[in-house]
Structures are given as structure tokens and as C-alpha cells.
Amino acid sequence: MEDKLGQKLDFTRIRNHRGTQMGGFEELCCQLAALEDPAEGSSFIRKGSGADQGLECYRSYLDGHEVGWQAKYFINGFESGQVSDLNDSLTRALAAHPQLRKFVVCLPIDLRDNRSGKKKSETQRFETWRDKSVAAAATAGRELTIELWSASSIEERLGRDNPMYSGRACYWFDAVRFSSTWFREKFDIVRSNLGERYSPESHVDLPIQQQLHSISRAPEMLLAPHDWAAKVMYNLDGASTSLRREGLQQVADQVREACAPLLQSLTAPPALPEELVAIESWAALCATALAAIVEALDELAKKELEKDIHITRKDLFDLYSALNRISRELESEAWKIINKHELLISGPAGIGKSHLLADFGERQLERKRPFVLVLTNSLTEGDPWQQIRGLLDLSLVTTDELLGALDAAAEAAGCRAVIAVDALNERHGITLWETRLQGFVALVRKFPRVTLALTVRSTYIHFFPLENLTRTEHPGFSGQSNAAAKAYLDRRGIARPSSPHLAREFENPLFLRTCCTYLDAENLKQLPKGLDGISTIFDFYLSAAARKVELDLRLVPQRNIPRRALNAFLQACSEQGDTGALTVESTFELLEGIHPSGGFTEKSLFSAFLGEGVLTQDVEWHEGSPQEIIRFTFERFSDHLRAKHLLDQVDRSDIQGSFRKEPLAGYFSLYKSWKFAGLVEALAVQIPEQFGLELFDVLPTNALRSDTGSTPFPRTVIKQLRAFDPAQQLYVAS
């Protein structure tokens, strides 16, 4: 046969696996065997390198009988020496597998039948060995069939109109494409297009990375259950010994019996990438074991106080702790999604979604695991699969064959292949994915060893059909901002003041990166002291962003063009009412009026601010249809600027009266105030600073309701807004 790449399959050119072509042939045969007769209730088992006991793999059926495969890379013929080698494998297989009924021999050649004189042909030699072996098994009381998969048989399978087969032809007989080098080259091209959105030199590990390792079925993650079991067994031995010493033999036996099923399940061979991990079963078995320990503690409490009873209690608590740790692990986000095949990562602009995917891809490729990264901004409005194949230089390969090849590469690597699509919302994202995403996901789901990782900006989520996808929110450095930001600053060589905590903006990696880049450009090695309020932080960030754009566009510093442009944009946004944003057209006109680009991207303030992440292109509903807008990326700054604009219009002779009419009154309506949470917080900070009054001093009596009302802003929360940080400082106490 000819493969889909236009070449006849040549087993002398099969891809290496574990360093040899013999390993490649053995792996191919195992992959084909796994596709053969997957009867309900049967299980497919690989034997592992160096411990095959005469079989590369086998399938065990419900009635107990087994079918085994042995691959021999006899590329130069089938002589008496090869017969002896094959016979040795069969002997070991029969000894290790009493229920083996069929022995499949895989060869990379077609046996010749050129009979001449007394010398047997290769076909005769095989048939003689086969018939003799079957007869010997019958004499020993065993039923045995021997089947030959020659080169033609293997080619027939690889030529079937099924991507699980044809994709394997693409993978195993194309020495260039789908190799680890090929995956690396394709990734490096895409990574370079990310620009500063991926900065490995200042990477900080975050817990969300474990969720990507989970859906990719990282082999090292599946070793954890063995470690859990070892800890439980160690503590179980100690607890059992202590219980017996106290004369509670029956209780000790009950605890051991309760733990046994869990230990047996945890120490079973790890699930293959296409199989389900038994997390629900583990959780139930763990709960049973924990209940048995509670009962044991109750029995122990009934005994009269004895000298060493506290030792037994401690041993039981240690066992309980080991089991409880398993229970907590299984409840973690990483383990809860281990049987999922897609992960959607959402988050605000600049939070680090692109960096997360690129860093994960880097780690996968370092471990020789298949990974493909696709940027939505590199796609147009056409068929995404056709474009992806084009970007991978696989235009002559069908989408099914591409996915089949990825499935084969994943099986060979012992994990799942990951297709990562970054930023569904960018460029033509809505038009591209709104009607195609479900079909895109459904096609990938047909391949059990291929998984999807997708990212999208949070504000775009409702524009895509994402209901059936597992979703997680990228927190940035939130929840561990001090440790993560400190690690980031350390890697950038930037010292931080001694104040204990960072403001919330520093939970955003983009914010940190921009500030650090500014310090580098100014030859500074420390965050400046005296950043004592939101306005100062705001000014520092704007200076950092403006300086970066100034350098990128090679602008004259004395003209201060980027900073003037940002100030003008922010002022215009503050005058836009509730949206706090401008249309794309208005933004472009405003920025071009300050610094004309002449139509060149490399001279455009608009492109530079978007590229740097200072401004964000978003979408909002306008008169029943989506409209793309441009807003300032960090909303708290926008909220404070909007608050300042509103307070500048307050009649100081009648402050309370100003809050009882529009526009201010509308922001504190019971049914609308939740939409303006950031603005309400900003007003709560600025009203005392401007008027010496608290927010509730200027609001109508029933505005925002009280603690017993249904408002999302109870009185205590508003008071705390001022109490926890009167100056909204960069470094706060809590």
C-alpha cells in the first residue's frame, strides 16, 4: 500500500522509538493491537520494555482467555535463528499466561515462498514451527492458535479508511513530521509570535498549571497514587500493631480490611491515557477506610485508660491523616478534571493566559510529549482545521489523519497530545469560533489520546458555545500575590520595599512586567518608595507603559507623546458614562490625532498600546448586537478616574442633593449597583478625601439597603473599604 503521504510503507524507515527502529516497530504493533477487537469488558495490557515475558501486550476478555502479541523486527529474513528466537518468546508467554489462547506474531516483512530443493522457504519454515507449536500445546492440554501479522497485514490495517489507522501511518512512516524536533520547530514559530506575552526568564509557577498536566495525563502525576498508598501502608502497619498490643485484634483486622480495597486500587498499574482514572472509586473507598478508623477510635475510647493508649491513638490519627490527604487531593481541581478531555481557561486581559499555555507547551516538549499551540489571531474567518494544517505544513494530510497521528504520537509518549488554542476572542475570534467551536471540540473527542486546552478573555465568554466544557479561571497571582510577585521581582532582579503586602494590581503579571521593564529601562533596581495611594500607583504604571511605547516607536522623549495620548484616552473614557470605554473607531481617531502613523503598524500608538496590554479590545452589547470597544486594561484605575470625573461635578453646596439625582443616584440603585461594584468602591475611597464625609453620609437612607437587605454592598462592607486601607496604598496590611 501507499500511505497518505504518497509513499509506500517501508519498514526499514519506520520511526525510532526509545532510540531504535525495533522499538518503533514494537510500539506500532502494540498500537494496532490495542485497536483490535476491543470487546466490552475486555482490558488491554502493555507489558513494558524489558519485562514482556514473551509478549509485547495482550488483551484479557471477560471469560478469562487472553490474546497476546509478539513483535519481531526481523527485517532481513526469517531463518532458523529467527525461528528459535520466536519459539523462546512463545515458551515464555505460555508459561506466564496460562489463559493465552491466541499468539499473534508481527513481522515487518512478507515471508517468501521460493521453494527450491531440500531447503525450506520462509513460509514453510514459519508454518512448520506454527503447526509443531500448536500440536505441542494440545498435547499439554492447551488450546492455542498462532496468527501471523506480516508486513502486508500491517499495511492493510494502516490503509483502512479510519483515522485511528491512517493517522498511525502518517506518524510512524514520516521521519520528519510529528517527530519531537518537528513539534519543537512548530512551537518555536508560534511562541515567537506571542512576543512579550511569554517571558520564560521571569516565569513563576502557579497551581493552575497542575490542571493542564492533569488533562494531558502527565505520567508523573499518575505515580502519585502509589506514593499515597505507600504512606497509608506504613501508617496502617503501625496502627495495626498498636491495636493488637491493646488487645483489639478484631478492630485491627477491621481497619486493615477497610483499607485493603483502596490500597489494591491505588497500587494497580496506572490508567492508560485513553482510560478513566478511578477517582470516584478511590474517593468512596477512602471514605469507607476513614469511617473504619473513626469506629476504631471509638472502640479505643471504651477501654480503660492504660499506660500507652495515647500511642495507639496517635497511630490511628496518623493513618487517618494519610487517608484524609488522599481525600483532599481527590477534591483538588487537578484531580477532579483528570478524566476530562478539554479545559477552558478564562481570565481578564493581561492575567497570563498566553504565558500559561506557552510555558506548559515548553515543558511538554522538553519531555518529548506532543504539543501544538495555535493563536487565534493567526487565523482568519475560514475553516480552522484547514488553517491549522496549513500552519503546520500539513496541507496534504486530512484533519482526521492529523488527529490520528497526534493520537499515535501520544500513545508512544505515554500521555495525551495537547492542542492548545490561545485567545478565542482575538481578531476574528467571534466570527471564527461562534458557529464552529462545538464541531471543533466534537471532532477532537473522537480521539481518546488528544485533548484541548483553550483560553478566552472573561468578557467574551457569552459569545461562544462553552456550556459543555470544563472551565477554570486564571487567578494570576491572586491568593498568593506576595510570594508570586516576590518570585517574579527576584527573577527580574528588582528589589521591593519592606512593606509586607502588595496591592491587588500586582496580582496581574502584565502589570508587574510593565513596571519591571520600565525600571530596567531607567536602570533602576527597586520599586520606588513613597507610592502611597491609588493615584500614585496609577501614575507610576502610566509612566512605565508610556516609556515602553516611547522606546518601541522611537519617539522623542521631550514631546511625551504616549503619556499625552493615554491621558487623552482616559479623559475621553471617563466622559462616556457607564461604559468607560470608546469604540475602536473613536480610539483610533483620537490617537491618530495625537501621533499620525501614516498607516504603518510599527508607528501606530493604537497598535503599540494594544500590543503592550495597556489598552484592551473588548466587546459589549449595544442595541442588541455586539460592538467592539477599547478600554483601559486595569479597571480599578478606570473606576477611580470615572469616580473623580463624577465627583468633580458635585455641587459642594448641596453634596447630599447631588447624590439624589442622576447620574450619581443611578449607581446606587438596588437593582443596578452590582454592575458598578468597582465604581462604588472608588467613590467610597474618594468621597472622604474630597468632602470629609463617608459614603453613607451622602446617600439616601435606603440606598444600597442595610446588612439585612439583598444588596451586594451592605453597610459594613462599605465602611471596611475605608477601614482596611484609608489611602489605598500600594502596600497594605491585609
Image: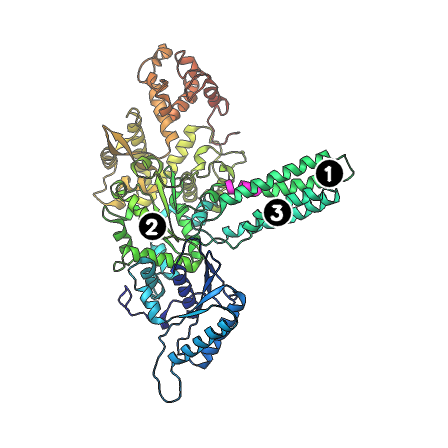
> Label for residue 310?
1
Label located before the other in sequence (1 or 3): 3
Residue 422 appearing in the image: yes
Q: Does residue 40 show up magenta in the picture? A: no
Between the C-alphas of marks 1 and 3, the distance is 20 Å
Q: Is residue 251 left or right of residue 197?
A: right
Task: Say what secondary structure mark 1 lies in.
Answer: helix
> Label for residue 444?
2
- Residue 705's x, y, as percent? 42, 15
Between the C-alphas of marks 2 and 1, the distance is 56 Å
Residue 89 appearing in the image: no
Amino acid of disc 2: Val
Amino acid of disc 1: His
- Residue 460's x, y, as percent? 32, 36
Label 2 crowding class (10 Å Cα cut-off): few <14, some 14-19, many 20+?
many
485, 564: nearer the viewer: 485
- Residue 273's x, y, as percent? 44, 53
Amino acid of disc 3: Val
